Amino acid sequence: MHNDAPVPPAQCTTMKEVREGVDYLDRQLVALIAERSRYMEAAARIKPGRDTVRDDWRVNDVISKVSAAAGEAGLPLSIAEPVWRELVERSIQYEFEVWDRTRD
């Protein structure tokens, strides 16, 4: 597995370079999402009741912040918004699982 920084997108001249760049970024994204999931574990540990796991205000807050950051980064909202909605929903489900597992 190759961990060196890939050729920047604007300088790619082959699909091999494109794929190496995507694979490199996917490995970074996995590591970041793993760290994010550990925050969900912390939330499950900290929240006092199962009824506090889902917080619709916070869901909207996250989506709003991500939408702003996406705009600043040049990430189309047509990608960012549905990806983060799914990530947030899956994270909530994971937090429920951890909450239940640690309270039984």
Image (spheres, rainbow, N blue to C red):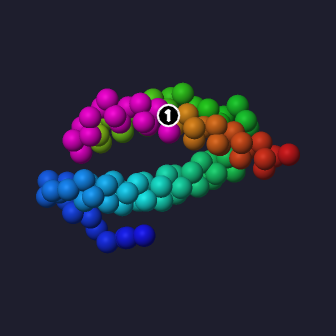
- Residue type of the residue flagged with mark 1: Glu
For the question of whether residue 32 can be seen, the reply is no
Picture quadrant where residue 19 is located: bottom left
User: Is 101 on the left or on the right of 80, as rendered?
Assistant: right
**Residue 75 locus on image (x, y percent):** 26, 40
Q: Position of residue 23 (x, y in %)?
A: 37, 57
Q: Is residue 84 magenta?
A: yes
Return the residue nearer the eye: 2 or 84.
2
Q: Quadrant of the N terminus?
A: bottom left
Numbered-mark total:
1
Q: Which of these two is toward me, 26 or 33? A: 26
Q: Is residue 69 left or right of residue 42?
A: left
- Say which residue appears at 44% left-offset and 37% top-offset: 84
Q: Residue furthest right?
A: 104
Q: Which residue is mark 1?
A: 86
Q: Which residues are magenta?
A: 71-87
